């Protein structure tokens, strides 16, 4: 069993910014020299998430709209009352979705479906530089 770790750095716009990172994850697998195993993609921070989604215009609008219905930004959050940073909704959304995703890879390729892309979602209320960790375990 072998492991390989890499980081992806991305600048985000915040406010449910969605960034397709599939090619960057695939590049990490390719450069690792590993053929089969599992790939964990993990967002460092408490206001971002990693998802799979069909990365197309309709869903890039539908997903943020759904998050607004689940954890609206205009609601009073105790987090905001304590820290005055206005991002209580960001923490709730990221906690519901989760910070990581594990995907098998076989013959050096992610086992994603045809319309499935690995996507980072920044739920925070301001732009940020984000670090995403990619950990491969396999052979």
Image (cartoon, helix red, strand yellow):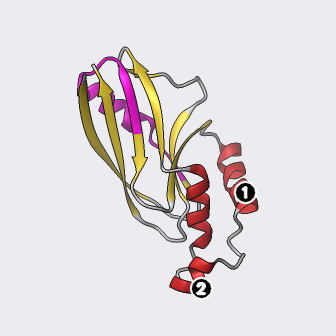
Q: Which residues are magenta?
A: 18-40
Q: Is residue 43 left or right of residue 35?
A: right
Dot 1 alpha-carbon crowd within 10 angstroms: few under 14, some 14 to 19, many 20 or more: few
Residue at left offset 50%, top offset 63%: 13
Q: Say which quarter of the image contains residue 79.
A: bottom right
| Residue located 67% across and 71% down the image | 73
Is residue 34 part of the magenta span, yes or no?
Answer: yes
Q: Foreground: 109 or 41?
A: 41
Disc nearest the viewer among 2 and 1: 2
Tell me where residue 22 appears, x and y as whole percent. Answer: 45, 36
Secondary structure of the residue carrying tag 2 is helix
The residue labelled by disc 2 is 81
Distance, label 2 to label 1, CA atoms, is 24 Å
Q: Is residue 107 left or right of residue 126?
A: left
Question: What x and y, as percent, mark residue 12?
Answer: 46, 60
Q: Position of residue 16 (x, y in %)?
A: 59, 59
Does the magenta run of residues contain 28? yes
Q: Identify the residue position indicated by label 1 in the image.
A: 65
Dot placed on the residue nearer the N-terminal end, 2 or 1: 1
Image height check: is 9 above or below 3?
below
Q: Residue furthest top?
A: 107
Q: Secondary structure at mark 1?
A: helix
Residue shown at 31% from the left, 28% from the top: 137
Quarter of the rendering containing residue 4: top left
Q: Quadrant of the N terminus?
A: top left
Which residue lies at the image location 50% right of the left edge and 57% below the top edge? Answer: 48
Relative to 6, residue 108 above or below: above
Relative vertical location of residue 114 with respect to residue 51 in this rendering, above or below: above
């Amino acid at each position: 069993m072998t492991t390989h770790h890499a980081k992806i750095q991305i600048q985000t716009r915040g406010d449910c910014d969605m960034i397709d990172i599939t090619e960057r994850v695939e590049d990490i697998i390719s450069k690792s020299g590993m053929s089969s195993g599992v790939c964990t993609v993990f967002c460092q921070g408490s206001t971002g998430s990693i998802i799979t989604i069909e990365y197309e215009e309709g869903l890039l609008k539908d997903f943020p709209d759904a998050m607004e219905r689940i954890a609206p930004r205009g609601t009073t959050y105790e987090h905001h009352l304590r820290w005055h940073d206005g991002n209580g909704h960001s923490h709730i959304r990221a906690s519901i979705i989760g910070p990581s995703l594990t995907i098998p890879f076989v013959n050096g390729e992610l086992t994603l479906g045809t319309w499935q892309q690995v996507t980072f979602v920044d739920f925070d209320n301001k732009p940020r530089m984000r670090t995403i960790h990619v950990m491969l375990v396999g052979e």
